[in-house]
Image (spheres, helix red, strand yellow):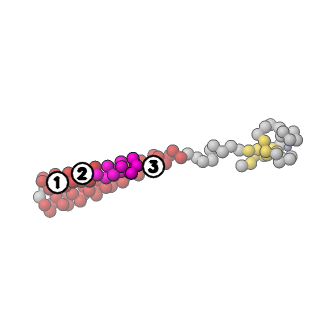
């Protein structure tokens, strides 16, 4: 079991504990038929909040990937002989005419 799985399990256990504690507190404070309704409301609300928080975390990590085309440079080809070069003049024939290619 790696650290990530362990953390996920701990998180699930923590939430199970929170749900358990909330259900005990509500069943003590509120009489039975109402406690059940309140409990379902709280569980649904927490589930919604957790999902929204998770979506936000995923959204922020997606920004790390950047533009894959940004680092790729443009190559120039001589229009006279077709040699690939990045200089002002073609090293093969000396022509100053060149075109950009990928
Ligand atoms: Zn050339």
Left or right: 69 in relation to 13: right
Task: Find disc 2 in the rendering and name its residue.
Answer: 17
Judged left or right of residue 60, residue 6 is: left
**Helix or strand or loop: what does disc 2 sit on?**
helix
Which badge, 1 or 3, is on the more N-terminal residue?
A: 1
Q: Which residues are magenta?
A: 1-13
Residues 6 and 81: in front is 6
**Would you say residue 82 sits in the magenta stretch?**
no
- Residue 8 colored in magenta in the image: yes
Q: Residue at x 24, y 58 (%)?
A: 41
Q: Nearer the viewer, mark 2 or mark 3?
A: 2
How many C-alpha atoms fall within 10 Å of the one at disc 2: few (<14), some, or many (≥20)? few
Say whether mark 3 is within 8 Å of ligand 1: no
Residue 39 position, x and y percent, is 21, 57
- In three-dimensional space, the C-alpha distance between marks 1 and 2, rounded to whole angstroms, equals 11 Å
Q: CA distance from mark 1 to mark 3?
A: 35 Å
Q: Which residue is mark 1?
A: 24
Q: Quadrant of ligand 1?
A: top right
Residue under the point 83% across and 42% down:
97
What residue is disc 3 on? 59
Residue 86 location in percent, x, y? 76, 40
Among numbered discs 2 and 3, the one appearing first in the sequence = 2
Majority secondary structure of magenta residues:
helix
CA–CA distance between discs 2 and 3?
28 Å
Residue at 36% from the left image edge and 54% from the top image edge: 51
Percent position (x, y) of residue 52?
A: 37, 52
Which residue is at a point 68% across and 43% down the rendered structure image? 73
Element assignment for label 1:
helix
């Amino acid at each position: 079991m790696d650290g990530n799985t362990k953390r996920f399990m701990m998180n699930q256990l923590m939430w199970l504990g929170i749900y358990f504690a909330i259900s005990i507190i509500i069943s003590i404070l509120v009489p039975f038929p109402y406690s059940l309704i309140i409990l379902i409301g709280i569980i649904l609300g927490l589930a919604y909040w957790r999902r929204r928080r998770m979506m936000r975390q995923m959204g922020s990590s997606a920004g790390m990937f950047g533009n894959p085309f940004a680092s790729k440079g443009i190559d120039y080809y001589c229009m006279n002989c077709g040699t690939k070069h990045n200089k002002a003049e073609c090293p093969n024939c000396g022509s100053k005419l060149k075109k950009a290619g990928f």
